Amino acid sequence: MFATLLIAFIVGGLICVVGQLIMDLGKLTPAHTLSILVVLGSVLDGFNLYEPLIDFAGAGATIPITSFGNSLTHGALAEAEKHGWIGVLTGMFEVTSSGISAAIVFGMIGALIFHSKGQHP
Amino acid sequence: MDAKQYDTLQQSLSPKPSIIKNCLKAFLVGGIICTIGQLITFFYMAYFNFTERTAGNPTVATMIFLAMLFTGFGLYKKLAQFAGAGSAVPVTGFGNAVISSAIEHKSEGYVLGVGGNIFKLAGSVIVFGVVSAFVVALVKLLLVTVGVTNW
């Protein structure tokens, strides 16, 4: 269990370092950086490389935003395998719906509870 | 200013050490957030019927719930100032972007303010994620149909 936590820490931390390097060396905004990482995760899954990373690193691979790109591609590919090209569209959100639905629901709840104090990073 | 003075001045102003420092902070905070995620994953695997792969979904939802609390109390902003990409890259950063937009535009009303602006910051992630997933899946489908590769 401790080893799993340590691997999650190291792999998750390293993905964040990649993001920091893109931000600092490329002089890009966080939005650009996150978009690049999402595309990266989605392309990695195209080569079947992201699922092995999840098996190895657990939350170290599922928590960074790259996993969002991975699950979008994964859902699309799984449906495309079954139903052909139409599955590319229908399967897209099959795996990744929890992140978006949670963000919308908690965003609404947050807006109901909290008042603006300038929460932007 | 002679060459030696210039060298010391250049070294003191050089951004390189700050990049290393930023990366260390990002590594530390990003790593800690992922470790918390792993603990939540353990929880879902122990008390519900989730496997290592399927536990990712409830874990992400729980992390976004935590991001809501941190954002609401103004703590995520402070964390982001320290951690940079370390707090932006994990899914909590995505949650923070959505939730902070929702709270900030609350004053414009729930439909036009919250509903219209909730994805103001995070929208690009969804758009580029979906478009890139579409292209990747389409290319792979073509390659499989042609017989170059298999699923």
Image (cartoon, coloured by chain):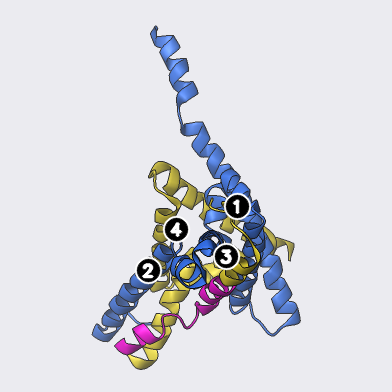
Q: Label 1 is placed on what type of residue?
A: Lys
State left or right for residue B127 relative to residue B84.
left
Q: SS at mark 4? A: helix
The Cα atoms of the two marked residues, 4 and 2, are separated by: 11 Å
Query: Residue pushed farthest right?
Result: B47
Please state which of residues B38 and A28 is positioned toward the viewer in this rendering. Answer: A28
* Nearer mark to the viewer, of 3 and 1: 1
Chain containing the residue with disc 3: A
Disc 1 target residue: A117
Q: Label 4 is placed on what type of residue?
A: Leu
Q: Earlier in the sequence, mark 4 or mark 1?
A: 4
* Magenta segment: A85-105
Q: Earlier in the sequence, mark 3 or mark 1?
A: 3
Res A39 → quadrant: bottom left
Disc 4 target residue: A34
**Placement of A67 over or under A119, stated as above or below:** below
Q: SS at mark 3? A: loop
Q: Label 2 is placed on what type of residue?
A: Val
Disc 2 target residue: B127
